[in-house]
Image: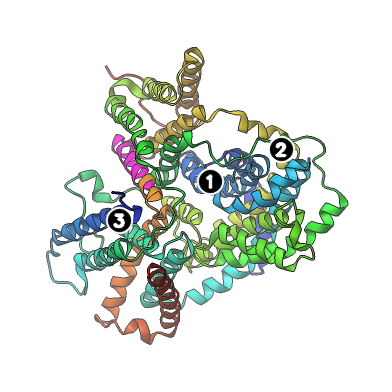
């Protein structure tokens, strides 16, 4: 069975909207009485309700139209290695430092995109890290953990 | 004080070595990135924000405006040589640009777009000068009720004008406003939607959202779709003279005039932006032409009208941003976010409280355009070389710059987590047909929207009818509701 794009989008939007309304319920009332008619919860409820209505509209009213930005499941799966790479990068970069972290991120990413030309890819990756170090750390003098923390 | 006198003083402040360097650097970087397919003006500005923050506020803002104009200039080059629009607004440029390049007229075509862009920008900047002050003065009468109505009007109009589905546009508004509510409620001190994460108590850094949605989201989208092959044509060489012929000029001058007006007026409408401006301008020229059959086969006037309107819309979008604090497009929402990070809040009092900064920005926009036309024409062959960089290197480079820039904002790895999270959100929004541009517009306006809404109800003692008893509010809300209802009605009818 083919699931339409609007149904998936609408369902995800609806889930998010309901989660948002649930979170709005969790907001504590202000500690003392104020002139504020809506309070901290009122506006989020209005926005949450508006999102629920729109989600239902997307689910049941929207006509299925070709969205050229849509991607297939196989294309979507191709994002997984990149996401894993980024996850590893974020976890390791505080220890490896930006220079090595960004070098590895660039190198592995280029390798995932296209195999071959390992030396060329290595050189480009080193140059990218080097350029970031020169521009951000040396020229712009922005404090960055460029090197491994021991 | 006389507007020309104020502009003269703006020029005096803008003409410093640092500012001209910032304008030139922004113009160059904007053009180069604009030429690259896939990265539009919003993404370019987003990536450049952390670099701009290292400069004094005026130089930083000048650089970002120059990047904006540069990206608009550069985007059409890809459309002409590759038949691949560098940005959505240059989709129409491919219609006549690529056939002109096939006929060996790529050089004159790129030059005409550069001249048209320059003309459109200058005319629209004159509009900024003469319209911002009266609109700001008028808006000084606005109270919280009127402001709430302006916010609703701007967001709803954006939902109907950007993207294909009004319902998805409306959801994008809600989503953006929802994210803007994360953090401590400034009126009561209560924390909201922080999920117990301390870092979120001060809210989400708008720039992190912008870099994530436009920068990282675009990279993810490219990574996923890179094997599709694209709809681009064979890359055509830039051979021969760059100088347009007399007949090219003769053909292009009327579209320059009309395109600049159409572009500026389109830019004024919240959400319409450069894409609608370019389509409107092109269809107008086609309708007025004695030889409409040439359109789509290499009509210079078609190309001239598109790029003039594109750039003129930039100035149009700046008017509501400076005078009302309402960005006219996704890109101006990014600019507004950057302005706020500098502690500058555009709105009716901006023109009086930050008069020096406003006129310096206007003067710098003139300078940026002059720099662009001077640099662009002789450097076009060099800029085109950018297209030779393999995208397998380009996308990791964009990602690395975005991540590094994001880290430097607050020196926090939490922001790096967040920027990737927003990258994923931006990617899925695009895939699902939601609008990242409206989302950013809403996240930028969300906090003010809630504040004005609550203030309005406090001053009116909880009386909702205040929104229809104020004439300004009533008109704005009526227009917005009619437009949105019409679109929803159309959606329901199509479904049946």
Q: Main secondary structure of the magenta part?
A: helix
x, y (%) of residue B347? 47, 66
Q: Could you tell me how far apart the alpha carbons at marks 2 and 3 are, in whole angstroms?
A: 46 Å
In this orientation, which residue lies closer to the viewer: B230 or A100? B230
In the image, farthest residue toward the bottom: B469
First in sequence, mark 1 or 2: give its number. 1
Total labels: the figure holds 3
Q: Is residue B145 left or right of residue B239?
A: left
State the residue at coordinates (74%, 64%): B257
Taking depth in this image into account, of B281 and A68 the one nearest to the observer is A68
The residue most toward the front is: A1
Q: Is residue B477 above or below residue B172?
A: below
In x, y percent, where is residue B186?
Answer: 26, 60
Foreground disc of the pair 1, 3: 3
Secondary-structure class at tag 3: helix
In the rendered view, tell whether residue B202 sits above or below residue A106. below
Q: Which residue matches tag 2?
A: B380
Q: Which stretch is magenta?
A: B411-426
Residue that mark 1 sits on = B40
Same subunit under labels 1 and 2?
Answer: yes
Q: Count neighbours of disc 1 (C-alpha within 10 A) and say few if under 14, some if 14 to 19, many if 20 or more.
A: many
Residue at the outermost right position: B246
Give the labeled residue for mark 3.
Answer: A7
Q: Residue at x 62, y 29 (%)?
A: B388
């Amino acid at each position: 069975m083919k699931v339409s794009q609007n149904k998936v989008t609408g369902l995800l939007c609806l889930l998010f909207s309901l989660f948002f309304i649930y979170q709005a319920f969790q907001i504590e009332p202000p500690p003392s009485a104020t002139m504020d008619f809506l309070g901290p919860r009122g506006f989020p409820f209005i926005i949450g309700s508006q999102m629920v209505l729109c989600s239902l509209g997307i689910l049941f009213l929207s006509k299925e139209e070709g969205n050229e930005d849509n991607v297939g499941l196989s294309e979507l799966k191709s994002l997984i290695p990149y996401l894993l790479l980024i996850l590893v990068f974020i976890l390791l970069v505080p220890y490896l430092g930006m220079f090595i972290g960004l070098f590895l991120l660039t190198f592995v990413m280029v390798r995932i995109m296209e195999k071959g030309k390992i030396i060329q890819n290595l050189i480009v990756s080193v140059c990218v890290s080097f350029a970031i170090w020169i521009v951000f750390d040396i020229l712009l003098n922005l404090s960055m953990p460029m090197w491994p923390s021991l | 004080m006389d507007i020309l006198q104020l502009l003269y003083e703006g020029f005096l402040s803008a003409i410093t070595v640092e500012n001209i360097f910032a304008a030139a650097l922004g113009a160059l970087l904007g053009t180069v990135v604009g030429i690259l397919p896939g990265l539009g003006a919003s993404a370019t500005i987003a990536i450049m924000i952390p670099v701009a923050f290292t400069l004094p506020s005026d130089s930083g803002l000048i650089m970002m405006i120059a990047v904006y104009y540069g990206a608009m200039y550069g985007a059409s080059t890809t459309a002409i040589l590759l038949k691949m629009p560098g940005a959505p607004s240059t989709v129409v440029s491919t219609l006549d640009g690529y056939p002109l390049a096939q006929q060996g007229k790529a050089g004159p075509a790129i030059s005409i777009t550069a001249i048209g862009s320059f003309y459109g920008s200058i005319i629209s900047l004159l509009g900024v000068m003469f319209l911002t002050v009266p609109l700001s003065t008028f808006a000084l009468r606005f109270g919280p009720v009127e402001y709430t109505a302006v916010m609703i009007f701007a967001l709803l109009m954006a939902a109907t004008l950007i993207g294909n589905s009004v319902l998805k546009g409306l959801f994008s508004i809600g989503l953006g406003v929802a994210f803007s509510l994360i953090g401590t409620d400034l009126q009561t001190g209560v924390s909201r939607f922080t999920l117990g994460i301390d870092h979120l108590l001060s809210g989400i850094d708008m720039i992190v959202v912008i870099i994530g949605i436009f920068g990282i989201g675009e990279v993810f989208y490219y990574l996923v779709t890179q094997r599709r092959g694209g709809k681009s044509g064979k890359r055509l060489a830039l051979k021969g003279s760059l100088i347009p012929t007399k007949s090219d000029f003769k053909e292009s001058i009327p579209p320059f005039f009309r395109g600049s007006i159409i572009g500026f007026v389109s830019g004024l409408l919240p959400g319409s932006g450069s894409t609608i401006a370019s389509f409107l301008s092109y269809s107008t020229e086609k309708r007025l032409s004695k030889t409409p059959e040439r359109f789509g086969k290499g009509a210079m006037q078609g190309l001239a009208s598109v790029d003039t309107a594109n750039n003129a819309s930039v100035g149009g979008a700046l008017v509501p941003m400076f005078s009302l604090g309402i960005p006219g497009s996704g890109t101006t929402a990014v600019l507004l976010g950057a302005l706020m990070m500098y502690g500058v809040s555009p709105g009716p009092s901006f023109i009086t409280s930050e008069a020096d900064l406003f006129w310096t920005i206007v003067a710098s926009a003139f300078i940026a355009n002059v720099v662009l036309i001077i640099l662009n024409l002789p450097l076009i062959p060099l800029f085109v070389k950018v297209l030779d960089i393999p995208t397998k290197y380009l996308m990791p480079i964009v990602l690395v710059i975005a991540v590094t820039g994001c880290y430097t904002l607050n020196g926090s790895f939490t922001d790096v987590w967040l920027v990737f999270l927003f990258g994923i959100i931006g990617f899925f929004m695009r895939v699902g047909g939601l609008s990242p541009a409206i989302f950013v517009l809403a996240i930028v306006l969300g906090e003010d929207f809630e504040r004005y809404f609550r203030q309005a109800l406090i001053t009116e003692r909880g009386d909702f009818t205040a929104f229809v008893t104020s004439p300004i509010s009533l008109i704005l809300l009526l227009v917005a509701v009619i437009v949105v209802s019409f679109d929803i009605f159309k959606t329901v009818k199509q479904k049946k």
